[in-house]
Amino acid sequence: MRRSLALKVGTVAAAMAVAVAGLTLSMNTATAQTNAANGYASQNGGTTGGAGGSVIRATTGTQINQALCGRASTSTPIIIQVEGTINHGNTADVSGSSCDVGNTLIDLKGVSNVTILGVGSGAVFDQIGIHIRESSNIIIQNVTVKNVKKSGSPTSNGGDAIGMENGVRNVWVDHVTLEASGGESEGYDGLFDLKDDSKYVTLSYSILRNSERGGLVGSGDSDLDSSFITYHHNLYQNLNSRIPLLRGGTAHSYNNHFVGIVESGINSRVGAKIKVDNNYFEDSKDPIGTFYTDLRGYWQVSGNVFDNVTWSSPGTDNYPAGPNPTSTTTVSIPYSYTLDNANCVPSVVSATAGANKGLKTSDGSCSIQTPTNPPTDPTDPTDPPTTTPPPTTGTNLSLGAGADGTSKGGGTSYGNAIDGSTSTYWSPSGTTGRISVKWDSAKTVDTVVIREASDAIGNIDNWQLVNNSTGAVLASGTGAGTITFTATSLTKINFVITSASGTPKITEFETYA
């Protein structure tokens, strides 16, 4: 019988830019990632994502879909820089000959040469998963994907944070944070799943935590074609099992930190082979072996540290590698790599793994390297900041409307945010508060522009855009700028500031159809 998961608490130089529905298309071809793909993702021709393609900034799921669908073809290189929170409320289906997307997930289906890169204050995919199908040459870097469910509400991607299937080739997932808030009974599934002939994949410098299932390779005992996966410098924390569950195929796990593994860790089954080098296993049970089946897999082990690890007794459907793990196969690795000593893995992984760590890496000698151009800095100093919205076409519906809100700061007025003048502004009485635009009769709105005073740019952190009549959250995110969402008929719309790093000053709250 499986135990329930016990969660731990606490712990450009561009000549011009084109603005379309809130997307900023930089006419330069800046490189997104600052590190090169490694591990098995470096094989089979390598993984470069959208390098050399156009760079588009997106703050909503709809804008990501528009970027994919706006390409000349399904293989036209593109780098999508994402900032803010992507969720169901700001993700709409988009039509186009170069995409096959949806409104419940980020769907990279039948495409190639794509990079999704978190920038600025960070990118969070909240309850919305990333699905890769029949695609190749994909990079996902510096993003957080959390609380994706297969049951309950809302549901997305079969409950997988990142999943790939059906002939996928060459994917590099790097410096991401994948997390849930429970196990299958709470509606969650895997954090990083591969199946149905997915090959040449690397997961590096990432965090996987707080879930029953880390991830699998192969959906069942007859799905044995997925192979050639590298896992390195990742933190696996507070997981029950599947780290990974490997059915058939070949994998390589090195310099990872496993901590608080409840049931089992690396589960090699059905003839699978995995090379396990210089990992640090801590406060965990059965970190390596074949579990829950008599279809055995194999492992090659060297240089690992087992710190406060317990091993179960061998038996039917249970074949732990310990308490004194020895190799049962050999695995030939086709790429070069440098191993950190296992004893320094916890400190190296702590300093480098996960989103918003500046893409820091190890030098292979237990020291940390910082890239010269991390994604938290602008890709190009002339690229317009997200706090200065691009021009929006159409009629600003806020002009001539009414406005109200929570307590305002001294000397300011709600009307200052809808008067068409950037020389006046509204401020809340503190760092949080609400300002609203309202009409006597319903208006259909799909775009909002929030403009900040020049001396307060960047003060707004987290916010929600709410339909006042229903309480529905139309969009949420961080920072001011252009917000697009599914067209909604309403009589009052609220911009709710939930956190700020300084006193917000909103010069204009513009609304458009």
Image (cartoon, rainbow, N blue to C red):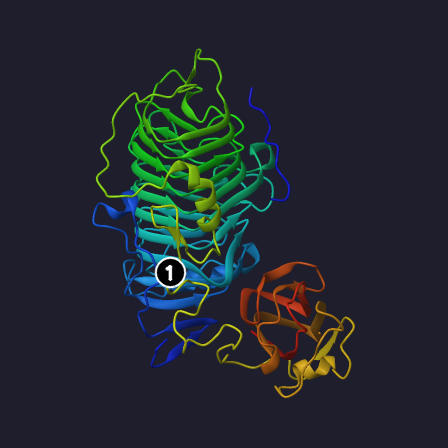
Residue type of the residue flagged with mark 1: Pro
Residue 277: horizontal and vertical position, in percent? Answer: 34, 33
Seen from the viewer's position, the closer of residues 1 and 102 is 1
In the rendered image of this protein, does residue 225 appear above or below residue 432?
above
Q: Which residue is mark 1?
A: 371
**Quarter of the picture holding the C terminus:** bottom right
Q: Residue at x 39, y 78 (%)?
A: 17
Seen from the viewer's position, the closer of residues 414 and 62 is 414
Residue 431 found in image quarter: bottom right
Q: In the picture provided, is 430 more to the left or to the right than 82? A: right
Residue 334 found in image quarter: top left
In the rendered image of this protein, does residue 415 appear above or below residue 430?
below
Residue 34 found in image quarter: bottom left
Q: In the picture provided, is 242 more to the left or to the right than 444? A: left
Q: Residue at x 55, y 49 (%)?
A: 127
**Quarter of the picture holding the N terminus:** top right
Residue 429: horizontal and vertical position, in percent? Answer: 76, 73
Q: Residue at x 38, y 65 (%)?
A: 373
Can I make out residue 169 in this image? no
In the rendered image of this protein, does residue 445 appear above or below residue 181?
below
Seen from the viewer's position, the closer of residues 378 and 368 is 368
Q: In the picture provided, is 438 more to the left or to the right than 160? A: right
Can I make out residue 77 in this image? yes
Residue 239: horizontal and vertical position, in percent? Answer: 52, 34
Residue 221: horizontal and vertical position, in percent? Answer: 36, 24
- Mark 1, secondary structure of its residue: loop
